[in-house]
Image (spheres, helix red, strand yellow):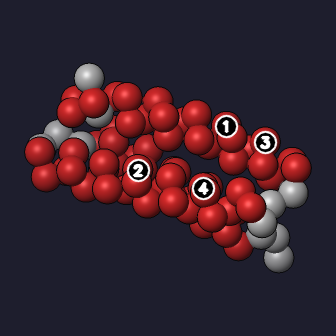
Amino acid sequence: MGNRLFQQARSRVEQAEIMVKEATTPEQLANASEEISKARNDLSSAFANSTIAEQRQLAQLQEQIDQLEGSLPEYR
């Protein structure tokens, strides 16, 4: 079945990426920022319960979240 927390974290990062790319209004930007925070929490939760291979993938997802956060206007 796989690691549920890992799958949830990966899905949350994908959702955050979509929201950041589509955000044009202040409200959408705020929602995208909130989704990034949720993704960070999910990544943190998944890391402790993951295999080494999953941890490597989670580290890549963390980098992706960092880049998404840096692309939001409020973080520039």
- From the top left corner, tell me how far across and down residue 23 is, in percent: 24, 43
The residue at 34%/28% (across/down) is 71
Mark 3 near mark 1, Cβ–Cβ under 8 Å? yes
* Displayed quadrant of residue 60: top right
- Which one is in front, 1 or 52? 52
Residue 35: quadrant of the picture? bottom left
Disc 3 secondary structure class: helix
Q: Which residue is mark 2?
A: 36
Tell me the kind of residue under disc 4: Leu
User: Would you place residue 58 above or below residue 35 in this image?
Assistant: above
Measured in 3D between alpha carbons, the distance from the residue under mark 3 to the one under mark 2, in whole angstroms, is 19 Å
- Distance CA(mark 1)–CA(mark 2): 15 Å
Secondary structure category for the residue under label 4 = helix
| Local crowd size for mark 1, using a 10 Å CA cut-off: few (<14), some (14–19), many (≥20) | few
Q: Disc 3 designates what residue? A: 56
* Residue tagged 1: 60
Callout 1, which amino acid?
Gln
